[in-house]
Amino acid sequence: MPSHALRVAVVCSSNQNRSMEAHNILSKRGFDVQSFGTGTHVKLPGPAPDKPNVYDFKVTYEQMYNDLVRKDKELYTQNGILHMLERNKRIKPRPERFQDCKEKFDLVITCEERVYDQVLEDLNSREQETFQPVHVINVDIQDNHEEATLGAFVICELCQCVSDSPNFTCVLTFESQTNHWVSGFCLNLEASVCIWVTGCLLGDVYLQWH
């Protein structure tokens, strides 16, 4: 890995729960981290499964919070959404889309396979600018508060492993290590090495543990 501090991006669908929990923990551990979503809109649970709250990525966490308080403060307090938005707005003003970010990272960690595919698709669509490698790794995390917390610690340990290693070999053994300290957590790891911005896929490693 490069001699400078590891630059990390954590990506989920809406940049609300999983990526923001990891962003929160990684930043507290001193990592240079940013978080993103890949969806076309931000979706938060609503009063029914078929009635989500849908927002544009330009809407701030503060505006979402106030909107949900107005709609049903009791409901969104009980299901933890308001608490989640309180945390989010302490970290940054609004959600961000990975596809709109042109900054460069050493490590991109996604939180589900669909998001992983979207990140690789975006990297492959970018015009050539540099030949800096970026490692893209997927850690499957269910989209609920408890799993987001567990997944964030998995991601933090993974980032520490990569940061402490002179190369990326440690990631290939990380899967077996995880089984010892994440009890009952189903982890699915996929990893790709890309050339940053060119999106030229150099190699692919698939790691899976159930």
Image (cartoon, rainbow, N blue to C red):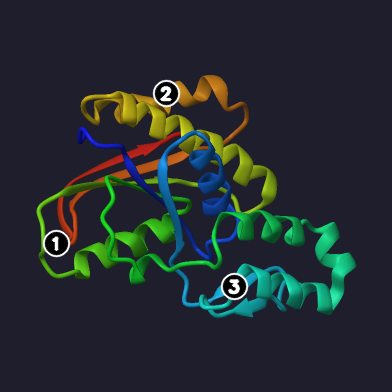
The dot on residue 176 is 2
Residue displayed at 20% across by 36% down: 2
Q: Residue 93 appears at what percent x and percent y?
A: 56, 66
Camera-side mark, 1 or 3: 3
Mark 1 → mark 3, Cα distance in angstroms: 31 Å
**Residue that mark 1 sits on:** 198
Which badge, 1 or 3, comes first in the chain's sequence? 3
In which quadrant is the N terminus drawn?
top left
| Left or right side of 46 for 117 | left
> 184 above or below 188?
above
Q: Position of residue 164 (x, y in %)?
A: 32, 24
Contact flag, marks 1 and 3 (Cβ < 8 Å): no
Residue 72 x/y as whole percent: 86, 74
Packing grade of label 3 (10 A; few <14, some 14-19, many >=20) is some
Q: What residue type is disc 3 on?
A: Thr
Classify mark 3: helix, strand or loop: loop
What's under tag 2, amino acid-wise?
A: Ser
Q: Total number of numbered labels?
A: 3
Label placed on residue 132:
none
Q: CA distance from mark 1 to mark 2?
A: 32 Å
Residue under the point 43% across and 53% down: 34
Between marks 2 and 3 in the image, the one whose residue lies nearer the viewer:
3
The kind of residue on which mark 1 rests is Thr
Q: What residue is rendered at 59% in x and 50% in y?
A: 142
Task: Write down the quadrant of residue 121 in the picture.
Answer: bottom left
Q: Residues within 10 Å of mark 1 (few under 14, many from 20)?
A: some
Q: Position of residue 69 (x, y in %)?
A: 81, 72
Between 27 and 177, the residue placed more toward the observer is 27
Residue 70 visible to the viewer: yes
Residue positioned 34% across, 24% down in the render = 173
